[in-house]
Image (cartoon, helix red, strand yellow):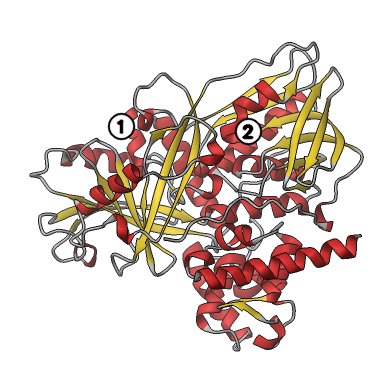
Amino acid sequence: MTTLPPTPSAPSTSPATAPDAGRYDVLVVGGGINGCGIARDLAGRGWRVLLAERDDLAAHTSSSSTKLIHGGLRYLEYYEFGLVRKALMEREVLLKSAPHIMWPLRFVMPHDPKANFLRPVWMIRIGLFLYDHLARREVLPGSEGVNLRAHKVGAPLKPQFTHGFVYSDGWVNDARLVVLNAIDAQAKGATVLTHTAVVSAQRDEQGWTAQLQSRDGTQRTVQARALVNAAGPWAESFLRDVARPARGEALATRSLRLVKGSHIIVPRVFEHDHAYIFQNPDKRIIFAIPYEDRFTLIGTTDVELEGDPGQAHIDAKETAYLCEQASRYFKQAIRPSDVVWSYSGVRPLLDDASGDPSAVTRDYLLEANHDAGAPLLSVWGGKITTFRKLAEDAADELGRLLGDQRRAWTEGAHLPGGDLSAYIGKAQRPDTDFERFVVELQRRHPWLSAALARRLARAYGSRVDRVLDNARSLADLGAEVAPGLHEAELHYLRREEWAVDASDVLWRRSKLGLHYTQGEQQQVTQWLAQAGAQTKRKVA
């Protein structure tokens, strides 16, 4: 089974993110989806922003989601109507902003009236009616019943599942979503520092003085008028151990419930393009989703976590659980031995005293603290679907705290690579726009294989021109370091996307590690190590 490479230990440097020695308006701590989204929004409003991330962008929770842009159908059971509506409203906003990394996905919910652990049909119909109508839809089709005996989606299922329901949500490449927000933040003037920890942050009446430390031990001091704590699973410990108030007393914090969600990847179980949502006897649900063409993603679990979130990993019990639940539905039994890769993420959920981790709210809370010094804004909870709205709310609040409200701008704005008009003209629908883009990309670069053109289009959208860099043949992309991965792409990832080593490239900027042998992964590791050494020599 392929395992995720360890966290890199070599120092990172990037001319594009050299630290500004001056003062900032806002220091954002944390390079996950919330931190990068907030930095982007603030920079777009003209604030001077510094984002500091201890590891790589999306190194933890934000690259370990189920990778869905969804309202959260099951949250209706917990009467989270406000959260579901907010998320439903965001789905199409996000799909239109970056059609290369997000696209519509139809979900199948099989039903067996003899299975007493399934929700009754009347309840499902009411839930889907609410899901269809809580927010306006322009792109995504509504729900419908389906005869599983006659439809292609019934073929992989056991024969007792004769009827079901189909509804719409969306899919997202979560790690790339984070990187695109960071790219846009930097393009709008923000400074983005990866592999840089905030080791202390002292507050006074005028602002914050923070000590930053790179992995090579180099330290620097920066000042900011306000600080955003977007440290995700570490948000509580950041306030407790790093941030220091003006008068020396401990900053008030909140209790987070750290819930581990694990996923397994198995060889492709079905051929069609729909996903499945399965109801389990414990009243939880799991998804089975087409993944990377050749695989099926199955998840997730909800397990209370004790200890360091950075060390979270799937255990044998979780693997067995996911296999068992999926095997209730699929004709083809899923076994632990089928698993080719797995990953775990830690959700930092607000502790609402719920006994069931699945019932803990996925909504967010922005908590401002400015009574005894410079503004501090802490981000508690949240889900990837609502990141843009969270960032907008955070930027609005920071403007209020800094005494200078500035206009919101991200709704309707494209993320980097998401504006395909230079290739296809006026946008029509996100899903069909992308397919037109792939056709045009291949027309302009007929020397690209169909598979490579589609992969590059999915990863980079209209920024693919920066990767190809005026290449007129495959040879112009440089050596093929691993199958389908050329030097030109690696240079781009190092130059413009903060990639340092193989973990960044193979498991976050892409999922090529899933397709490569250990030897091919090692070739990428060696190439990046040599490129990093050359950069160090040039700097020296």
Q: How many marks?
A: 2
| Residue type beneath disc 1 | Glu
Q: CA distance from mark 1 to mark 2?
A: 26 Å
Taking depth in this image into account, of 252 and 211 the one nearest to the observer is 211
Disc ID at residue 393:
2
Left or right: where does residue 243 sit relative to residue 301? right
User: 359 above or below 112?
Assistant: above
Q: Evaluate whether residue 70 shows in this view.
A: yes
Disc ID at residue 412:
none
Q: Where does the image place residue 482, in percent across and percent down from the top left?
A: 59, 76
Q: Where does the image place residue 134, in percent across and percent down from the top left?
A: 39, 39
Q: Which residue is mark 1?
A: 77
Neighbor class of circle 2 (other Cα within 10 Å; few <14, some 14-19, many 20+) is: some
User: 458 above or below 367?
Assistant: below
Taking depth in this image into account, of 483 and 458 the one nearest to the observer is 483
Taking depth in this image into account, of 21 and 34 the one nearest to the observer is 21
Q: Residue at x 28, y 66 (%)?
A: 270
Neighbor class of circle 1 (other Cα within 10 Å; few <14, some 14-19, many 20+) is: few
Residue 274 position by quadrant: bottom left
Q: Where does the image place residue 227, in percent across and percent down from the top left?
A: 75, 29
Q: Where does the image place residue 36, in percent across and percent down from the top left?
A: 66, 44
Residue 420 position by quadrant: bottom right
Left or right: where does residue 288 sit relative to residue 39? left
Q: Residue at x 25, y 36 (%)?
A: 283
Tag 1, which secondary structure?
helix
Q: Evaluate whether residue 413 shows in this view.
A: no
Q: Residue at x 18, y 40 (%)?
A: 118
Sequence order check, earlier mark of 1 and 2: 1
| Residue type beneath disc 2 | Asp
